[in-house]
Image (cartoon, grey):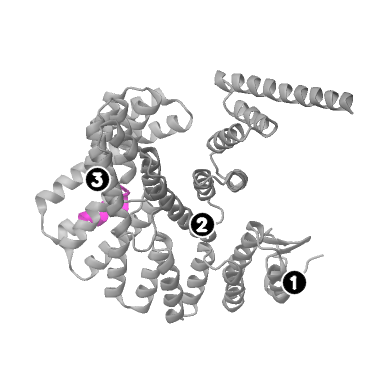
Amino acid sequence: MQTPFDDPGKETKEKVIINDRTYTGKEIAAYFDDVLEQLSSGLRSSWNRVQYTLAAHILINQKEYSKALALLYRGLQLYKYEPHMIYLTIHVLIKQKNFAEADRIAKEYLNDNPGDFCIKLTESKIKRVEGDFKAEEISLLQLIITPGSDYLDNRFKMAAYQRLANIYMKSGRFEQAEAMVEKLMRRDLDESVWSMYFDILHNLNRKDSLDKAKNDFARYRRACIYFEQGTEYEIAGKFSLALSNYRKGLEIYDKDSTVNIKTGNILLYRKRWYSKAETYIRRAVELDPEQENYLTTLILCLRNQGKYTEAFEYAKKVIAMNPQSETGIFRILAKKIDRTNEFVAIANQTIENDKQNLFPKIRFELAELLDERGDADKALQYYRQALEIWFKQARNFPDDWELYFNIGKCYLKLGKDAEAEASFRNAEKLRGCNLPEIYIELIELYRKTHQPHKLIPYLRKIIRLNPVDLINYVDLGINYASLLTANLRQKESKKKWDKHI
C-alpha cells in the first residue's frame, strides 16, 4: 500500500536515521518537528552532525527552505563552525534572497577560517546574485591570492579564474580575461577553456595568436589519446605502460602540467629514476609555478639526488607561498647544508606575520629545531602555540585525522603521554587516516612508557599492513620476550613474598 510519501515508480535513497527510526523523502518535512527535536536532543557526535546535513539536503531538494534553515540554525548551535552546515545555510539564504544575512554568516565564519576556499567562493556568489559585480571581482581576486595546496583548493581557484574571465569578457576587458584564462589553462585544458581563449584572441584581433592557439589545440587533442590511455594504465597499476603513453603524448603536446607531473611522479616514486623524473617535474613547475605540490615534488626529487642547496632554495619559495605547507623538509634541508640560522629567521618572520594564528606547522618545526639546540624554554613556547592552533582547528574540523595526529605529537613534546595516546587513538578512528603513521607513533609511545601489552597489538597491526618489513617481526619478538620476562619476574617476586609471609 502506498503512502502519501511514496514516489510511484521511483525508490528514493534519501534517508535520515535518528535513534532507531528512519525518515525517508518527504517524511522529513511532514514530521519536521519530531525530526528536529530528536536531532537536537541527540549526543554531539559525527553521526549526529551528518544526519543534520543529510536532513538539510533533503529539505533543500524539496524546496522546503524555511524548514531547512530552521534545522541548520539549530545544528550550528551544536556545531558552530561546521563548514558544510555553513555552506548550506548560505545557500538557503541566497535562495530566500536574504543576502545580508548570508553575507554576515560568511564573513563571521571566514574571520576565524580565512583559508576555507569553498566559503570564499560562496561569498563571491552572494555578491554576484546581488548584482554587485565589482565586489564579486574583489572577492574572487582575494581568493586566488590566498595560499592553498591541496586538490580541492586548486579546483576552487580554477572556478575563480573562470568566473573572473567571464566578468572581464562581459565588460570588454579582454586583456584581463586573457590573463585569467592563461592561468586557468595551466591547470585545466578542457575544451570550454580553449573555446573561451579563442573568443578572447578573436576579440583582441590577434589573428596569428589565434591560429597558433588552434594549432596547439589540434596537437593537444591528438596527445589526449595517449594521455587518456596512460591514465587508464596508471589506474590499473600498469605503470610502465602508463609512462610510455604519457611520454608519447608529451612528445606531441608538452604543455600539459598535469601529465608532466604524473610522468615525473612515476619516474620518481615507481622507477627511482630521479634525474629523468626531474626533467618532467621541472617542466610542470615551469608551466604552473604557483602549484605548491609541484614545487614540493621537485624538492623531494632534488633531495634524493643530493642537490640539497637547490632543494633548500625551492623550499624557501614554498614557505613564502604557503607557510602551512610541509615545513619538516625545510628544517631537514637547513640542517643538511648548515643553514639552520636562515631557517630560524624565516620561521620567526613567518610567525610574526601570522596575526590570525593560522600556521601551526611552522611553529612546531621551529620548536623541534630549538629543542635540538637545547633551548627548551623557547621550544615549549612554540609547541604550546602550535597545540592551541591545532585545537582550535580540530573544533572546526572534527573529522580531520591529521589535526588529532599533530595534537598527539605536540603532547608528546610537552611530556603529556596519556593525552598524546588519546589523540592518536582518536585519529585512528577517523576515516581516511594514515594508519601506519599512527601505529608507528603509538608503538614508539608504548615503547617509551614500557607498555608491551599495549605495544604488541599495534605491532601485529602494522605487520598486517606491511608484511614484508622484517624489522617489525623482530620488534614483535623482542616485545613478546619482554612481556614474558616481566610476567616471570612478577611470578617469582610473588613466590618469594609468599614464602616470606
Q: In which quadrant of the rendered image does the N terminus lie?
A: bottom right
Tell me the CA gap for discs 1 and 3: 57 Å
Q: Which mark is residue 391?
A: 2
Q: Residue at x 14, y 47 (%)?
A: 211
Q: Earlier in the sequence, mark 1 or mark 2?
A: 1
Q: Based on the displayed image, in which of its 4 quarters is residue 471 positioned?
A: top right
Task: Specify start and end residues of the magenta stretch as a single range.
Answer: 187-198
**Residue that carries the numbered disc 1 in the rendered image:** 4
Mark 3 vs mark 2: give the one in front: 2
Give the residue type that dot 3 points to: Pro
Residue 381, given in percent of the width and then of the height, sits at 42, 53
**Is residue 12 visible in this depiction of the protein?**
yes
Front residue of 66 and 365: 365
Residue 17, given in percent of the width and then of the height, sits at 71, 60
Q: Which mark is residue 204?
A: none
Mark 1 vs mark 3: give the one in front: 3
Q: Residue at x 31, y 71 (%)?
A: 136
Tell me the CA gap for discs 3 and 2: 33 Å
In the image, residue 415 above or below residue 497:
below
Q: Secondary structure at mark 3?
A: loop
**Is residue 253 visible in this depiction of the protein?**
no
Residue 443, given in percent of the width and then of the height, sits at 59, 33
Circle 3 packing at 10 Å, graded few (<14), some (14-19), many (20+), is some
Q: Secondary structure at mark 1?
A: loop
Q: Earlier in the sequence, mark 3 or mark 2?
A: 3
In the image, residue 369 above or below residue 126:
above
Query: 286 left or right of 103?
Result: left
Give the residue type that dot 1 points to: Pro
Circle 2 packing at 10 Å, graded few (<14), some (14-19), many (20+), is some
**Residue that carries the numbered disc 3 in the rendered image:** 289
Front residue of 146 and 93: 146
